[in-house]
Image: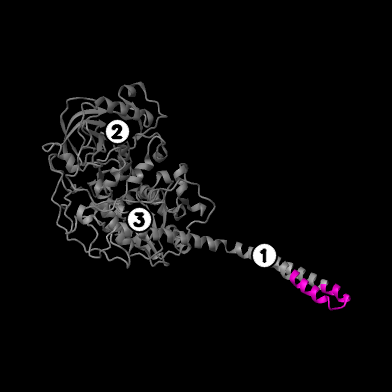
């Protein structure tokens, strides 16, 4: 256009020059040339300035793009909720205690498993598992923000069900580029996961034409000192893998965890006093209780993992198979009685026709047959397939964990298939993988697929949403573990020293502009918690579900799941701990839920612990480390 303008002016000058003297033509051409030259200079300058301004605004435009993408996700969630939910304001969310009055299905009557206190003597082995649930007053439904629809489907009043879980498509594992940590939050403001209600007993039906085979994971309750929740969960995940591997005739019975709440104040005194040998003893426990998987996990969602549509069988439906005495046809064992399981009566041996009564999760079972297959151990720890068993160990069917152990186990299942309806699995450690602390990386085990099916129960998720609605956005969730040996770091300025932990929290709050801190921790020392709370001036302290020392120990894992669900909805999550593979399981579990299952931005989840020798693997690419920020 500049050239056309100049040439047009040149034409006008030339046309008017016909009436003028020929001596003025040269000056007109010179003037036009000057205008053209100046125009070129001005155009080039404008172009350069535009490019500089564009480069300077790249960060701004990137932030606007992220915000726009977040808004698109939010609007998609709203549209999905509008199509899936009943917008009638009179319909209230389904409660854990049972359906609303409008629902025609009977209320859930799952029986709780009785806790056993250290101060209460054990009862006889024939003591029943069930106890009548205490009458509870239904809490009023939480108020919801304007425009948010209730989490009840249109078919809930007729079918007694809610929408099936719909987590986002899992993200592909990818390397984290050289971007800044803690980008603007893209966590959806509405719930993007809708759990199923707790199943109702009596709903199971075996649909396999040849009948069903049932697999139940068992542990004795009385006197149990074995692995804590984290290792039990890994063992149960391996049982889940077995059930699917065995085929569509096999059904998983609802798993049960044995929870052993610790007196962490006593643990800290023992550790600081050099008495670490007493950490795994009766005196450090408040007690123990059996926790049903349906209390913390969505069993219906888990049931979609298997090769059939029968799902997971509730304990009540399993017990109904043998009303007089629950029966285990073949009990597959990894070991016999030891110091961690004084209530275990059966020896680890392969023997038919035993017909012995054994207590598991506070209920008596009649065991007809046992099959013994142990793992090679060193100081109590199972060794992987790098270990070479001796001739005596081979004779006793003692195998390295991983491939050799799995192969022998599949052969045993095949051997007893025809004569067994109920298989019991007595394992409380991870034995199928040759990758110690790296089960998630084992290509022969579908850990990630199983992990995506182990999502929060309706009761846990409903409480978490109530808590999240009370917190201002954005907020950061923090996990601080300080039990057992980690208390030593409070004495030498380590990762769990109170000032160091507060420094990390304050820096993250300032970096992210977070308005609140949600803390999940096992610190029972209230003086230390008060010090930490007073060291967070930017948010006026932290929020908690309940201070650990004030909780009912019979609800320890339920509180933990509640905290994890809230943290999965946080805009940011940070953790302090040892190396990822050997550190606090709640943090590791949260990383998997936030970034692998729910698909949060990996750079919103940051680990502020030491990397350590096990710091490698593809899953590490789904979150960031503090040193890289």
Residue 534 position within the rendered picture, expressed as x and y whole percent measured from the top left: 38, 65
Q: Residue at position x 73%, y 69% from top? A: 39
User: Is residue 14 part of the magenta span, yes or no?
Assistant: yes
Q: Residues within 10 Å of mark 1 (few under 14, many from 20)?
A: few
Residue reaching furthest to the left: 324
Element carrying mark 1: helix
Does any portion of residue 473 appear in the rendered image? yes
The coloring applied to the image is one colour
User: Is residue 498 part of the magenta span, yes or no?
Assistant: no
Q: Residue at position x 32%, y 68% from top? A: 146
Please give the label number shown on residue 192.
3
Please give the label number shown on residue 247.
2
Mark 3 touches mark 2? (CB < 8 Å): no
Please count the marks in the image: 3
The residue segment tinted magenta is: 7-28
Q: Residues within 10 Å of mark 2 (few under 14, many from 20)?
A: few
**Mark 3 vs mark 1: in front:** 1
Does any portion of residue 362 appear in the rendered image? no
The front one of 312 and 539 is 312
Q: Quadrant of residue 256?
A: top left
The front one of 501 and 466 is 466
Element carrying mark 3: loop
Q: Is residue 285 left or right of residue 75?
A: left
Q: Is residue 362 left or right of residue 391?
A: left
Q: Main secondary structure of the magenta part?
A: helix
Please give the label number shown on residue 47.
1
Q: Is residue 509 above or below residue 328?
A: below
Q: Residue at position x 33%, y 24% from top? A: 393
Q: Mark 1 or mark 2, which is nearer the start of the sequence?
A: 1
Residue reaching furthest to the right: 23
Q: Quadrant of residue 537?
A: bottom left
Element carrying mark 2: loop
């Amino acid at each position: 256009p500049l050239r056309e303008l100049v040439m047009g002016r040149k034409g006008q000058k030339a046309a008017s020059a016909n009436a003028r003297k020929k001596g003025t033509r040269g000056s007109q051409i010179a003037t036009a040339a000057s205008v053209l030259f100046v125009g070129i200079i001005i155009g080039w300058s404008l172009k350069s300035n535009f490019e500089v301004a564009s480069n300077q605004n790249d960060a701004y435009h990137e932030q606007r793009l992220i915000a726009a993408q977040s808004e698109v996700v939010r609007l998609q969630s709203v549209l999905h909720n509008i199509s899936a939910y009943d917008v009638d304001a009179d319909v209230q969310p389904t409660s854990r205690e049972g359906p609303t009055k409008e629902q025609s299905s009977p209320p859930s009557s799952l029986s709780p498993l009785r806790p056993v206190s250290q101060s209460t003597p054990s009862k006889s082995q024939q003591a029943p598992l069930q106890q009548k649930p205490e009458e509870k007053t239904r809490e009023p439904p939480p108020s919801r923000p304007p425009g948010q629809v209730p989490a009840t489907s249109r078919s809930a009043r007729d079918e007694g069900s809610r929408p099936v879980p719909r987590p986002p498509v899992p993200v592909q594992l990818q390397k984290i580029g050289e971007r800044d940590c803690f980008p603007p939050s893209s966590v959806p403001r509405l719930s993007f996961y809708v759990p199923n209600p707790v199943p109702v007993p009596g709903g199971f039906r075996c649909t396999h034409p040849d009948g069903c085979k049932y697999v139940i994971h068992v542990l004795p309750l009385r006197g149990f000192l074995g692995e804590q929740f984290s290792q039990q969960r890994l063992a149960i995940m391996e049982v889940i893998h077995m059930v699917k591997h065995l085929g569509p005739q096999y059904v998983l019975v609802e798993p049960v965890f044995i929870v052993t709440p610790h007196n962490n104040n006593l643990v800290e005194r023992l550790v600081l006093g050099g008495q670490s040998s007493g950490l795994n003893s009766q005196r450090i426990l408040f007690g123990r209780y059996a926790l049903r998987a349906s209390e913390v996990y969505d069993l219906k969602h888990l049931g979609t993992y298997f090769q059939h549509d029968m799902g997971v069988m509730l304990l009540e439906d399993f017990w109904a198979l043998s009303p007089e005495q629950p029966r285990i046809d073949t009990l597959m064992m990894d070991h016999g009685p030891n110091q961690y399981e004084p209530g275990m009566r059966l020896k680890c041996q392969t023997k038919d026709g035993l017909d012995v009564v054994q207590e598991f999760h506070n209920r008596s079972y009649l065991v007809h047959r046992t099959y013994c297959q142990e793992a090679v151990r060193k100081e109590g720890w199972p060794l992987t397939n790098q270990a070479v068993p001796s001739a005596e160990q081979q004779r006793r069917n003692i195998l390295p964990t991983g491939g050799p152990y799995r192969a022998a186990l599949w052969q045993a299942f095949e051997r007893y298939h025809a004569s067994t309806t109920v298989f019991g699995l007595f394992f409380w450690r991870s034995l199928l993988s040759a990758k110690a602390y790296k089960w998630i990386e084992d290509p022969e085990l579908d850990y990630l697929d199983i992990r995506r099916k182990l999502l929060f129960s309706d009761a846990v998720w409903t409480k978490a949403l109530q808590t999240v609605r009370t917190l201002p956005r954005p907020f950061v969730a923090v996990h601080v573990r300080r039990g057992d040996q980690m208390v030593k770091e409070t004495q030498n300025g380590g990762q769990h020293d109170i000032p160091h932990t507060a420094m990390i929290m304050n820096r993250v709050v300032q970096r992210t502009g977070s308005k609140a801190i949600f803390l999940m921790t096992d610190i029972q020392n209230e003086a230390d918690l008060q010090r930490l709370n007073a060291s967070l001036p930017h948010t006026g302290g932290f929020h908690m579900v309940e201070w650990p020392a004030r909780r009912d120990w019979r609800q320890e894992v339920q509180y933990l799941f509640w905290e994890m669900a809230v943290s999965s909805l946080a805009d940011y999550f940070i953790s302090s701990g040892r190396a990822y593979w050997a550190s606090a399981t709640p943090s590791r579990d949260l990383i998997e839920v936030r970034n692998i299952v729910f698909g949060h931005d990996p750079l919103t989840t940051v680990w502020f612990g030491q990397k350590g020798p096990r710091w490698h693997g593809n899953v590490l690419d789904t979150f960031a480390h503090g040193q890289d920020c």
